[in-house]
Image (spheres, rainbow, N blue to C red):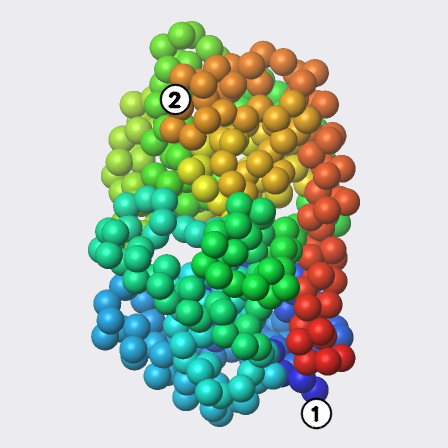
Amino acid sequence: MAPRILYVVTEDWYFLSHRLPMARAAQAAGYEVHVAARLKDGRAGIEKEGFTPHALHWSRGSLSVRDGLSAINELRRLFRRLKPDIVHNVAIKPVVLGSAASLGLGPAVVNSLTGVGSLFIGEAKGGGFTRRAVRFALARLLRRNKTWTVVQNPDDRDFVLELGVAPEHVVLIRGSGVDTERLTPLPEPAPPVTAAYVGRMLADKGVPTLIEAFKLLTDRGVSMRLLLAGDCDKENPGSLAPEQLREFASAFGIQWLGHVTDIHDVWRQANFAVLASRREGLPKSLLEAAACGRAMVATDAPGCREIAIDGETALTVPVDDVEALANALARMVEDEAMREKFGKAARQLVETEFSADAIGRQSLALYDRLIGR
């Protein structure tokens, strides 16, 4: 029988956006792939890949004990029925609940921490108590036998090691992979020079800081266009409200595109990427920008600095520093040669270290090792 792997993620769209390279690699190697998530518009996409979807009835934003226990029971029933050889939990909520649900059932467990998230860096519901409780749970669950933790950057590896996880059970796989065949270098658009942010409209992603920096540049007379591409996230306590964004867009001349289906549409319009995040796992938005040959302005924050290398692929600035961000944006606007140099280096870096093929091979090697193939 084919070995069976079950991915546990919060949302179907997140699986399709961030887990396809490893799932495709597993399927090509003979694994039977299943996906457990809250299913909405992504069910058809999962089935089209030849994977089997399983609906979970949980809320990504809920932190209640009752909802957590309900989710654990639902997952436990699924694990008993499917009997997967490997359960791969992705992001903090599935890691905690999926690991708890697997207790005593025997599968090898892979826990992917895709950054420590707003729970540890932003305006988390429940505050310090919730953070301490989750940290306590992670410390116990990640140290179990037959459990391996995948991190995307060295800072998150240090976080996991501080929880007491054995180094041989921590695996660094840098990102979720980017399709370098579909995303290829694009020529820069005509003036005005345009910066683009791609991602959810969250405070922890630095969207308010970016808007303030853009306003500062406008007041200084710097001619620059700013695009924001992505949705608000009502289940995240740090999300901007749609009416806030519309007000900012109207007052400051910012173009908010909302959700964009084809990322090419953004990078055809933009000369460079910007991300003012407080912390990342490894930002796919910057990987995609780099694949399209775009230079970057980003914060010198965990995750960001893996792809946004100061003076090589990007200009980097301190977190939450409006003045520094405005100055870096202005430099990027004014220096076309620097944008070209950084964009070429970013593309080369993505090809050699962050391609979907490379990430898929690394993930498959881990799966095979866990089941002795």
Q: Position of residue 81 (x, y in %)?
A: 49, 92
* Residue at image mark 1: 1
The residue sitting at 27% across, 31% down in the picture is: 247
Q: Quadrant of the C terminus?
A: bottom right
Badges 1 and 2: C-beta atoms under 8 Å apart?
no
Q: Amino acid at mark 1?
A: Met
Q: Position of residue 3 (x, y in %)?
A: 67, 84
The local secondary structure at tag 2 comes to: helix
| CA neighbours of label 1 inside 10 A, class few (<14), some (14 to 19), many (20+) | few
Which of marks 2 and 1 precedes in the sequence? 1
The local secondary structure at tag 1 comes to: loop
Name the residue nearer the viewer: 162 or 308.
Answer: 162
* Residue at image mark 2: 322
In three-dimensional space, the C-alpha distance between marks 1 and 2, rounded to whole angstroms, equals: 57 Å
Q: Position of residue 36 (x, y in %)?
A: 48, 75
The residue sitting at 45% across, 42% down in the picture is: 279
Q: Left or right: where does residue 219 sit relative to residue 229?
A: left
Question: In the image, which disc is placed on residue 35?
Answer: none
Please determine whether, in this image, residue 150 is positioned above or below residue 266.
below
Q: Amino acid at mark 2?
A: Val
Q: Left or right: where does residue 269 sit relative to residue 235?
A: right
